[in-house]
Image: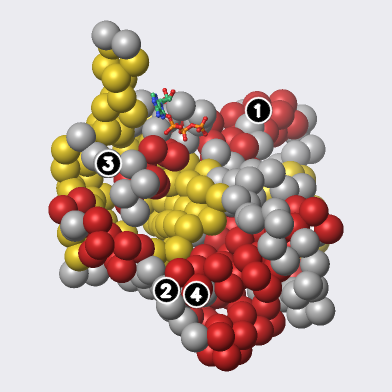
Amino acid sequence: MIKIDSLTKEFSIGEKKLTAVNDLSLEIQSGEIFGIIGYSGAGKSTFIRLLNRLETPSSGSVTIGDKQITTLSKKDLRNARQDIGMIFQHFNLLWSRTVQDNIAFPLEIAGVGKSERQKRVQELVDLVGLTGREKAYPSQLSGGQKQRVGIARALANRPNVLLCDEATSALDPETTNSILDLLVSINKKLGLTIVMITHEMHVIRKICDRVAVMEKGSIVEQGDVLEVFSHPKMPVTKKFVKQVMGDTDEDEAEMNQLFQNENNRNVLRLHFIGETTNQALISQLAKKFDIDLNILQGKITQTQRGAYGTLFVQLIGDQHEIDKAVQYIDEQTSVEMEVVENER
Ligand SMILES: Nc1ncnc2c1ncn2[C@@H]1O[C@H](COP(=O)(O)OP(=O)(O)OP(=O)(O)O)[C@@H](O)[C@H]1O
């Protein structure tokens, strides 16, 4: 477990003091993928660099496993860092070294012998999907491949924790997805705890179990990703959710317009959260009851903890059958439902 207690980092700029991380406390469980999201300047990079003491805190503590990182001597810190891998937005590779030599670098520093090093490097190359590219130089690789080298290098000494500092921000959406998939598979295969900072809600949605929202050096909201998606509290969180879900207020307004038309009766708003999200519900309803279903609008998005979203559906047919279908959704499924009333 990672335990962060009242962590504060102040920078002095001339006479002025700037508090980049402000009395921040947080617990991250072993084996989870924990995301920290915030806009530029929120203090995310400073925070993640405090975890492995690339930045020295002004006050507070960071404990990873049984080690209090903040009080370790330089030598003990060097050893402790072998348990904490890190990847970066701009990869931070050694440009004059090949893929295999970049990955071997932390093993050389740790004093691992040549034959064991070679074996480990090959394992890592295979793990991150770079087989055949061992002798390439970073300049010959795509952005996604460079990040794969970064990940392999970060995992070389078999760390328990992987810190990701905007690891996909320099990548196009498709490559971002492939790197995120790789991180999930590594998390599952190795039981690695992953802490990632990002300004993209898509990253949180796709791979994180829990999320904390950071603003002005503090965490203003945190929880399970699904919970935060479905019930965002703070304005900043609502803005991030909008990044992925679109503007739900606008959607509502559009739907209300539609309901002014009296032909639009029997409209349901189905709200899916997590395991309850069962898109098969629509086909089930059509099979079980003598009705047609017309999907008017909606958005369902997948998270690590299941899917989340809203569908507006109109039920068409005999009112008795429609009532039975509504009762079925209400009583037999865990989908949250609201019958949207026609105002006329
Ligand atoms: N070494 C430093 N010296 C002085 N101020 C710093 C230093 N590092 C960061 N800051 C300031 O601390 C605040 C938080 O910066 P930080 O980089 O941690 O934010 P961030 O959320 O990661 O944003 P970004 O994604 O833009 O880097 C900013 O106001 C920044 O200017």
Instruction: Say left or right for 1 vs 310.
Output: left
The alpha-carbon separation of the residues under discs 1 and 2 comes to 56 Å
Assess disc 4: are there few (<14), some (14-19) or many (≥20) residues with their C-alpha within 10 Å of its C-alpha.
many
Q: Quadrant of ligand 1?
A: top left
Q: Looking at the image, is mark 4 or mark 1 earlier in the sequence? A: 4
Q: Name the residue: 63% across, 65% down.
A: 102
Assess disc 2: are there few (<14), some (14-19) or many (≥20) residues with their C-alpha within 10 Å of its C-alpha.
some
Tell me which amino acid carries mark 3.
Thr
Q: Name the residue: 63% across, 46% down.
A: 90
The alpha-carbon separation of the residues under discs 4 and 2 comes to 5 Å
Numbered disc in front, either 4 or 1: 4
Q: Circle 4 is placed at which residue position?
A: 107
Q: Nearer the viewer, residue 14 or 337?
A: 14
Q: Circle 1 is placed at which residue position?
A: 250
- The disc at residue 56 is 3
- The disc at residue 312 is none
Tell me which amino acid carries mark 1.
Glu
- The disc at residue 110 is 2
Q: Looking at the image, is mark 1 or mark 2 earlier in the sequence? A: 2
